[in-house]
Image (cartoon, helix red, strand yellow):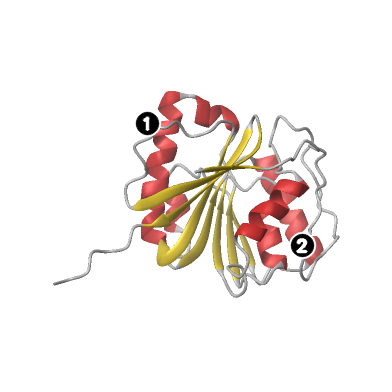
Amino acid sequence: MVFWGDYRDTARMLKIIAGEFRSRILEGPPDSETTRPITARVKESVFNLLRGWCEDAVVLDLFAGIGAIGLEAVSRGAREVVFVELNGRIASILEFNVRELGCGDRATVVRADALGPAALAQAPRDCDLVFLDPPYPMWTDEVSQARLIDLAVRCRENMKDSSFLILRTPEDIPADFPGIPGFDGPESHAYSLDMFVHLFSPTPAPESS
């Protein structure tokens, strides 16, 4: 099911929306082509969907960029957030944001390829939330999209039975999408013609007879 919202204001307000660090400004990327930070209104909507899930949560932020999503989770009470970012310049900005907020005890930056084995090897094994926010061209390319789906499948080993995987894409998931093995969903939310957020939850294990 797809839910549409009126989010035509696409101004990128790189600041924390709520919680401990409310209204704190984040250092942004040098340009919107290097990363595509989630807009303030969409971020607020996503965290409203996840209301109650951030407090004391363990969070994995893949393709973390400058930390707009993961640092919002920290501000809203997450106990531990691991950020994975490969781009060296962007990772440096992310580390700066962590230092400026003074939340290094709850935020760990891993400089690694989210698609590679090292990223999940350094990730928590009991995640409540996994944010998967790849560069848009990766989703629209058939080969890299397959690698992203494989990454999502592998993330299941790092997630609690009751948890969410949140995927952002530039297009809706087609009706014939076969799903992500090990997950139920998606519940899809459309915020503009090129911004969709999809929620997946781990498929419950069958009850033993």
Residue 30 position (above or below residue 95): above
Residue 36 screen position, x and y as percent: 69, 37
Instruction: Choose the circle earlier in sequence order: 2 or 1.
Output: 2
> Quick check: 125 left or right of 133?
left
| Front residue of this view, candidates 97 and 151 | 151
Q: CA distance from mark 2 to mark 1?
A: 44 Å
Does any portion of residue 2 appear in the rendered image?
yes
> Compared to 57, does 142 lie above or below?
above
**Residue position marked by numbered label 1 in the rendering:** 176
Residue 192 coordinates in the image, percent (x, y): 68, 34
Q: Amino acid at mark 1?
A: Asp
Circle 1 SS class? loop
Q: Residue at x 13, y 72 (%)?
A: 209
Q: Residue 90 sits in which quadrant? A: top right
Q: Is residue 52 left or right of residue 103?
A: left
Which residue lies at the image location 72% right of the left edge and 67% below the top edge? Answer: 75
Residue named by callout 2: 99
Is 202 or 82 nearer to us in this picture?
202
Q: Quadrant of residue 83?
A: bottom right
Helix, strand or loop at label 2? It is helix
